[in-house]
């Protein structure tokens, strides 16, 4: 009986920190800052906010969705990057045992490419190279793994093409995948 009361009993109150994690993004990082400082502050905000969002790739990506909705594109970029990293872990290191690549990943992958495009549109000199390189590696590896087991890879390959259009200056020829 105690099991059912946990499932159907009163929901725990949402902590003020969890509420704050969603409302921190109301005020985007000051867009008048130099591009490198803007990105550094975006990353610092992400690191503060992500502490309240651990769990699944969707839970982390939800932080990106909230930030993007408030025009905080740099912070959103880091949330989606981490979510893609978590997908990569599920697919490669966990050998797709608990989750397989699918169309359910589209909003996460698209969230990253949208955040990247929006960030670079506003801050063309933002030092996003490390983020793009990491996500390129993750998506290439996921796509290759999909192809090896007969799953569709178009979602991940399409994101890679979009990233190449949005950030053609990022050196990727040495990124494995």
Image (cartoon, rainbow, N blue to C red):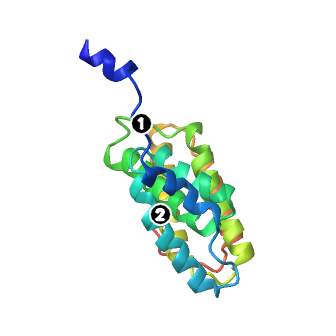
Query: Circle 2 — which element?
Result: helix
Q: Quadrant of residue 91?
A: top left
Residue 131, position as x, y percentages in the image: 51, 70
- Residue 90 visible to the viewer: yes
Q: Give residue 150's mark.
A: none
Residue at which label 2 appears: 137
* In the image, residue 132 above or below residue 5: below
Residue plotted at (64% across, 67% down): 27
Residue plotted at (39% across, 58% down): 51
* In the image, residue 28 above or below residue 97: below
Residue found at the very far left of the displayed protein? 2
Residue found at the very far top of the displayed protein? 1
Decide: few, some or many residues near mark 1? Use Cα within 10 Å; few <14, some 14-19, many ≥20. Answer: few
Of residues 152 and 2, which is closer to you in this image? 2
Marks 2/1: CA–CA distance: 19 Å
Residue found at the very far right of the displayed protein? 121
Q: In this image, 70 relative to 141: left or right?
A: right
Q: In this image, 149 relative to 163: left or right?
A: left
* In the image, residue 130 above or below residue 56: below
Residue plotted at (32% across, 15% down): 4
Task: Tell me the mark number nearer the camera, choosing from 2 and 1.
Answer: 1
Residue 11, position as x, y percentages in the image: 41, 30
Residue 133, position as x, y percentages in the image: 51, 71
Of residues 18 and 110, which is closer to you in this image? 18
Where does the N terminus fall, quadrant-wise? top left
Q: Give residue 99's mark.
A: 1
Residue plotted at (37% across, 51% down): 89
Upstream in sequence: badge 2 or badge 1 = 1
């Amino acid at each position: 009986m105690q099991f059912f009361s946990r499932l159907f009993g009163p929901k725990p109150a949402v902590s003020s920190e969890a509420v704050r994690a969603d409302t921190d993004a109301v005020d985007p990082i000051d867009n008048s800052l130099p591009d490198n400082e803007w990105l550094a502050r975006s990353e610092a905000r992400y690191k503060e906010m992500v502490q309240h969002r651990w769990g699944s790739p969707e839970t982390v990506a939800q932080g990106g969705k909230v930030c993007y909705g408030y025009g905080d594109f740099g912070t959103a970029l880091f949330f989606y990057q981490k979510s893609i990293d978590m997908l990569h872990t599920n697919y490669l290191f966990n050998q797709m045992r608990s989750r397989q690549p699918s169309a359910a990943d589209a909003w996460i992958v698209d969230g990253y490419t949208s955040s990247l495009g929006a960030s670079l549109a506003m801050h063309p000199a933002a030092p996003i190279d490390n983020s793009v390189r990491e996500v390129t590696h993750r998506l290439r590896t996921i796509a290759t793994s999909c192809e090896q087991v007969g799953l569709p890879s178009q979602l991940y390959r399409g994101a890679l093409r979009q990233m190449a259009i949005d950030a053609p200056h990022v050196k990727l020829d040495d990124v494995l995948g």
